């Protein structure tokens, strides 16, 4: 087996938050499509109409006060670093670098004698994912960049728009 997630650490606004979050969910990369069928076509085809919003969730059993104080502030850098391990012991790094803002803070239930969990949601405007140093995604919503495996899928649209 290769590339099994062994551990993860979060860095928010340049500060190390290793140990604050025990579960991190990366953004779902989802291209929104609409069906298109014109005369002479036997079936509809899916047309790329842009991407869905990118959201990250951070869950933990601590109360990360420094992170909570960033709620709603724009352009917050968030870096998630993972260690991927193979069955032969090889370790590779995975890094997700994002910018955006925290948009929800679910403080969870506070109950005597039990852990309090909290969940923070981060709305990303930029997202770069690298695995073993290889860039998988580079997405910049405001600059209209969507690179997947090094191919900029929106370059011709930017050219057509003159941006």
Image (cartoon, grey):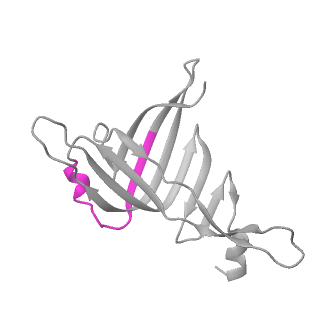
One can see residue 16 in this view: no
* Residue 76 highlighted magenta (yes or no): yes
Instruction: Name, please, the residue furthest toward the left.
Output: 112
Report the residue at 54% width, 49% height from top: 129
Report the residue at 64% width, 58% height from top: 147
Report the residue at 38% width, 51% height from top: 57
Q: Quadrant of residue 39?
A: bottom right
Q: Is 149 or 47 nearer to us in this picture?
A: 47
* Residue 40 highlighted magenta (yes or no): no
Q: Is 156 or 50 nearer to us in this picture?
A: 50
Q: Which corner quadrant holds the C terminus?
A: bottom right
Give how far across and how far down residue 98 sits, in percent: 45, 56
Q: Is residue 78 above or below residue 141?
A: above
Give how far across and how far down residue 71 sits, in percent: 27, 62
Q: Is 109 or 85 nearer to us in this picture?
A: 109
Q: Which residues are magenta?
A: 64-81
Q: Is residue 34 left or right of residue 41?
A: left
Q: Is residue 48 above or below residue 39?
A: above
Report the residue at 58% width, 56% height from top: 138
Q: Is residue 130 above or below residue 88?
A: below
């Amino acid at each position: 087996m290769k590339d099994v997630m062994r551990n993860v650490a979060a860095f928010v606004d340049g500060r190390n938050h290793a140990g604050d979050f025990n579960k991190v969910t990366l953004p779902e990369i989802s291209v929104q499509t609409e069906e298109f069928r014109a005369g002479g076509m036997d079936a509809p085809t899916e047309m790329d109409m842009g991407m869905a919003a990118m959201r990250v969730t951070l869950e933990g059993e601590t109360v990360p006060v420094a992170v909570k104080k960033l709620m709603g502030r724009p352009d917050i850098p968030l870096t998630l670093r993972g260690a991927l391990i193979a069955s032969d012991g090889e370790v590779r790094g995975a890094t997700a670098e994002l910018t955006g803002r925290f948009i929800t803070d679910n403080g969870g239930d506070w109950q005597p004698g039990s852990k309090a969990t909290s969940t923070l949601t981060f709305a990303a405007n930029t997202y770069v994912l690298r695995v073993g140093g290889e860039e998988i995604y580079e997405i910049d919503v405001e600059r209209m960049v969507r690179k997947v495996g090094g191919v900029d899928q929106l370059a011709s649209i930017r050219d057509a728009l003159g941006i």
